[in-house]
């Protein structure tokens, strides 16, 4: 089974950044729940501009830590929001983001323990 985070990318970051990577990953784990909540609220309130912003932010931060699928799903949601669309597909993408985010968080929590 493929990991939700590109391990070679994490190892490269660890070589370049060193132990500070642990703090970066911890920060990611701490800030992600708020972003997920903001995405949820934007969908509920049918606020496409906020949905686009928060999906974009999660996409970027997830890509920066080497998440594999999560940034792709965020990009799909961001694209819908940019078009002003909040519909059943948006809700399905958000459900997928929740699943992928949980997998990324579990992986990173374990990875942090290897420092």
Image: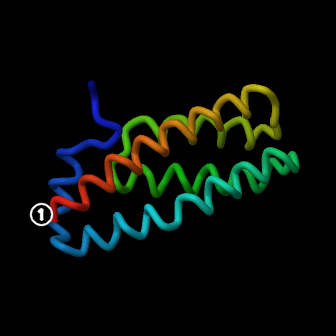
**Quarter of the rendering containing residue 111:** bottom left
Residue at 73 percent of width and 43 percent of height? 82
Describe residue 17's horizontal placement relative to residue 82 as left or right.
left
How far from the left and from the top, in percent, is residue 79?
Answer: 66, 38
Q: 4 or 113: nearer the eye?
A: 113
Residue at 41 percent of width and 41 percent of height? 103
Q: Dot 1: within a 10 Å radius of its alpha carbon, few (fewer than 14), some, or many (20 or more) residues?
A: few
Quarter holding the N terminus is: top left
Describe residue 8's horizontal placement relative to residue 85 as left or right.
left
How far from the left and from the top, in percent, is residue 92?
Answer: 68, 28
115 w.r.t. 81: above or below: below
Quarter holding the C terminus is: bottom left
Describe residue 22's horizontal placement relative to residue 105 as left or right.
left
**Quarter of the rendering containing residue 26:** bottom left
Residue highlighted by disc 1: 15
How far from the left and from the top, in percent, is residue 48?
Answer: 80, 47
Residue at 54 percent of width and 53 percent of height? 58
Residue at 16 percent of width and 54 percent of height? 11
How far from the left and from the top, in percent, is residue 49?
Answer: 78, 53
Looking at this rendering, what residue extends furthest in the right direction?
45
């Amino acid at each position: 089974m493929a990991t939700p985070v590109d391990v070679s990318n994490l190892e490269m970051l660890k070589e370049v950044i060193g132990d500070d990577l642990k703090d970066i990953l911890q920060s990611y784990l701490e800030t992600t729940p708020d972003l997920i909540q903001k995405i949820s609220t934007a969908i509920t309130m049918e606020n496409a501009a906020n949905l686009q912003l928060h999906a974009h932010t999660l996409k970027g931060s997830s890509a920066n830590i080497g998440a594999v699928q999560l940034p792709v799903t965020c990009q799909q949601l961001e694209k819908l929001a940019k078009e002003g669309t909040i519909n059943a597909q948006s809700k399905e993408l958000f459900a997928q983001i929740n699943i992928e985010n949980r997998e990324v968080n579990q992986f990173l929590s374990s990875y942090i323990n290897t420092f």
